[in-house]
Image (cartoon, rainbow, N blue to C red):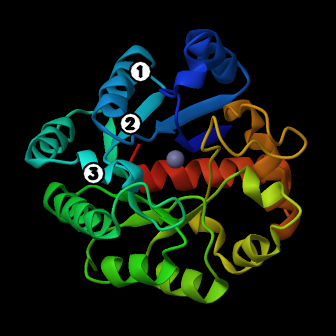
Amino acid sequence: MYFDTHAHYTDESFDNDRDETIKAVRESGVELIMNASSDNESCVKSLELSEKYPFIYSAVGWHPHEAKTFTKESEELIRRWCTLPKVRAIGEIGLDFYYDLSERDVQRGVFIRQMELARELKKPVIVHDRDAHAECMEIIRKFPNIKGVFHCYSGSAEMAKEILDMGWYLGFTGAITFKNARKALEVIEMCPNDRILIETDCPYLAPVPHRGKRNDSRFLPYMAQKVAEIKGISVEDAAEMTYLNGRRFFEI
Ligand SMILES: [Zn+2]
């Protein structure tokens, strides 16, 4: 029983075998997928996937890389898309000061605008934070009534504590299986069981022993295994626990 709470099945790396892959994923025991979007085109494609597959839900939003393409019209589109039954979150949104593919001021403005939309539309948010921990915190503190998840959490245990105190969730990818994952493992240890989500972020971040290959939701058991080890529970219980957390968070 698995819920992949952050995937990108609209990515072009699935263009040649998207339907076969999604079918194999479903048959492997993955019950739910939250497909995250990055820009106008990926939102439209994600909504098509959600329409085609009952077990795929969508998050709509502009990734910090694509902040430069966000316009007044994008806001109207998000408003419209959020009325659709399969749209359950705004995301992924946030700041990426590692790649800096959009100007930092533009990233900040678009992140704040989408947080305002989430407040208005009463949707949870999926936050992408790369090398921008302090600034992401500064922004989310201004929205105490919004519920969110830090996907692929990469901050400290101290920052995690503040996020958890706000009622937010933390998402963990295949990166928790990498050799250098010590910090993330400490965070999982201190994170209450009912706030942990697992995700692939596919096609990126395939877990060990598949690191470097194209990722898909069939690899979620590796993330569940890691959570199970740290929490001292069975893999099945870790899978079920994170599945139920995802359903509660996205109200599915
Ligand atoms: Zn992502």
Nearest to the observer: residue 249 or residue 170: 170
Specify the amino acid type for callout 1: Leu
Q: Residues within 10 Å of mark 3 (few under 14, many from 20)?
A: some
Q: Nearer the viewer, residue 15 or 91?
A: 15
Dot 2: what SS?
strand
Q: Which residue is mark 1?
A: 49
Q: Residue 225, relative to residue 200: is it above or below?
A: below
Asked if the residue at label 1 sits under 8 Å from ligand 1, the reply is: no
Per the model, the C-alpha gap separating discs 2 and 1 is: 8 Å
Can you tell which of label 1 and label 3 is closer to the viewer? 3
Residue at point 27%, 34% (across, down): 40
Report the Cα–Cα distance between label 1 and label 3. 25 Å
Using a 10 Å C-alpha cutoff, classify the residue at mark 2 as few (fewer than 14 neighbours), some (14 to 19) or many (20 or more).
Answer: many
Q: Is residue 180 left or right of residue 43?
A: right
Residue 67, horizontal then vertical, whole percent:
30, 53
Mark 2 and mark 1 in contact? Answer it, CB < 8 Å.
Answer: yes
Closest to the observer: 65 or 118?
Answer: 65
* First of labels 2, 1 by sequence position: 1
Q: Quadrant of residue 32?
A: top right
Instruction: Read off the residue under disc 3.
Output: 68
- 2 or 3: tag closer to the N-terminus: 2
Residue assigned mark 2:
58
Name the image quarter holding the C terminus. top left
- The amino acid marked with disc number 2 is Ser
Residue 238 place in picture, x, y as percent: 75, 54
Q: Amino acid at mark 3?
A: Lys
Q: Which quadrant of the figure has residue 19?
A: top right
